[in-house]
Image: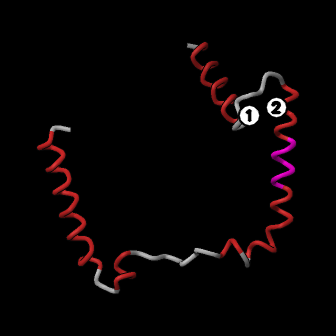
Amino acid sequence: MSNLYFDEIRIVSVKVNSCNCEHHANGLNRFLCNRIRLMRLKAFAVMYPKLKDGILKKGHYGDITLPKLFKVNDWVVVIPVAAMIILLLMWIERSGF
């Protein structure tokens, strides 16, 4: 039982401490990769005030839903979508997927 607990801790610690790139053979490469990641984060933090009002706002339209987009009641969208889901499930059941 203790080995299982140790393995779970080791797996979690490896997932948290590992980098996205899987080419690390020794600790030095991991150290350098973490340093590069920190430099990228610092560069983004320095540029963020300039980016905040510019490119980061592009494509932000707030909370848009299909009923708001079509300017109709919610149920006008809910009922046809529910019917399409039911028909899709019936088709999947009949075709044997």
- Residue 9 vs 97, above or below: the answer is above
Residue drawn 62% across the image and 19% down it: 7
Q: Position of residue 71 (x, y in %)?
A: 34, 86
Q: Is residue 2 magenta?
A: no
Judged left or right of residue 83, residue 4 is right
Q: Position of residue 46 (x, y in %)?
A: 86, 64
Residue drawn 58% across the image and 74% down it: 59
Which of label 2 and label 1 is nearer to you?
A: 2
Q: Is residue 38 magenta?
A: yes
Q: Which residues are magenta?
A: 35-41
Amino acid type of the residue that numbered disc 1 sits on in the rendered structure: Asn
Numbered-mark total:
2
Judged left or right of residue 70, residue 8 is right
Q: Position of residue 95 (x, y in %)?
A: 14, 42
Judged left or right of residue 48, residue 5 is left
Q: Position of residue 76 (x, y in %)?
A: 24, 78
Q: Say which mark, if any, is on residue 17.
A: 1
Q: Residues within 10 Å of mark 1 (few under 14, many from 20)?
A: few
- Residue 55 vs 27, above or below: the answer is below
Task: Please tell me in which quadrant of the rendered image residue 43 appears.
Answer: bottom right
Q: Which residue is mark 2?
A: 30
- The residues tagged by marks 2 and 1 sit, at their Cα atoms, a distance apart of 9 Å
Q: Determine the residue located farthest toward the bottom in the rendered image.
A: 71
Residue drawn 87% across the image and 42% down it: 35
| Quarter of the figure with the C terminus | top left
Task: Please tell me in which quadrant of the rendered image residue 54 appears.
Answer: bottom right
- Residue 39 vs 96, above or below: the answer is below
Amino acid type of the residue that numbered disc 2 sits on in the rendered structure: Arg
